[in-house]
Amino acid sequence: MSLIELDNSAGGLRKIKEELKKLTIIFSCISVILFAAYYSYLMVKNIDEPLYLIIYSILFVVVLAMFMVESLVIENKNTSRKKKREVVENKRRFKLLIKTPKYIAKSILVGLAIFETINNFDLGISNIINILLAIVLVIQIIFEVVAHYLTYYMDYLMMCVKKDIEESQLVQFIDGFRVTKKIGDKLEDLAYKANGEDKFTKQEQEMYKEIDKWKDVVEKEKKEENKGKIIRGTKGLIKAGKEKIQKILPKKEK
């Protein structure tokens, strides 16, 4: 058991991230099914138009291939905390890279569909589907962007909390008596140094730099606030003292 437990908070954040991941997967599956159905419809519709047929076939293959590759990316379990973190970060970057051609292909399709809708606007089923697909694509992109940044900042927040606890004087004082932990931390640090590595991943290092930068801002504001309190308090006491002295002193006769 640790001096201060964070497992509940870490578990809660993990739960939120897992739920976001599930929602993203569900939305992605629904989207690819809708687009696959629409691609099939367009290919059948343009069976006598070789150019359109080739374009829609290529777009369909790109979307389907990117979806399958994205679904097959699995996190590899490793005993090292840093290695686990690197796997997670690399997976996020890879999935982001895969999403780019997928969304480009979908956007081209939606663009062609909207162009067709504008040129032949009516309330027919084809135009309604075109508009719905455009809405689905926009919602999917927004949701995945929001989910990406939420996940990032949940990690960021957890790192802030851990850093605050580690830098607390009480924790540092008590940790001084935890010999096993000190030896383990020291050996780990030495092992990373011997291999010319940092204990943290590049993304974590960037996060810590950002945390330290904003910590300096907060500490500066606190110092300024404390100075302000001293100045305001001193002025208030002087003013109150002057008022009391004036009350004690006899009033001058006119």
Image (tube, rainbow, N blue to C red):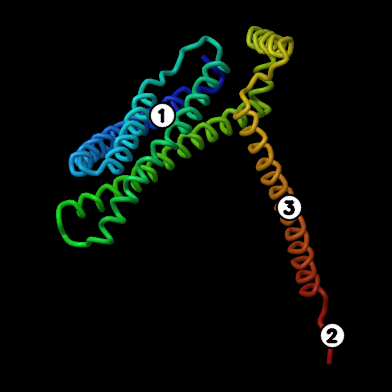
Give the Cα separation between the discs numbered 3 and 1. 36 Å
Which residue is located at x 66 percent, y 28 percent? 167
Mark in the foreground, 3 or 1: 1
Q: Which residue is mark 1?
A: 12
- Which amino acid, by three-letter code, is at mark 1? Gly
Dot 2 amino acid type: Lys
Label 2 residue SS: loop
Q: If you read the primary sequence from the N terminus, does the residue marked by circle 3 or circle 2 appear first?
A: 3
Sequence order check: which comes first, mark 3 or mark 1?
A: 1
Residue 29, position in %: x, y? 28, 32
| Three-letter code, disc 3 | Glu
Q: CA distance from mark 2 to mark 1?
A: 72 Å
Q: Which mark is residue 246?
A: none
**Which residue is identified by label 2?**
252
Q: Position of residue 173 (x, y in %)?
A: 69, 21
- For the image, the number of numbered tags is 3
- The residue pinned by badge 3 equals 224
Q: Are marks 3 and 2 in contact (CB under 8 Å)?
A: no
> What residue lies at 68% left-to-right and 20% top-to-bottom?
198
Label 3, residues with CA under 10 Å away: few <14, some 14-19, many ≥20: few
* Residue 40 in picture, x, y percent from top left: 21, 37
**Residue at 44%, 18% in the rendered image:** 75
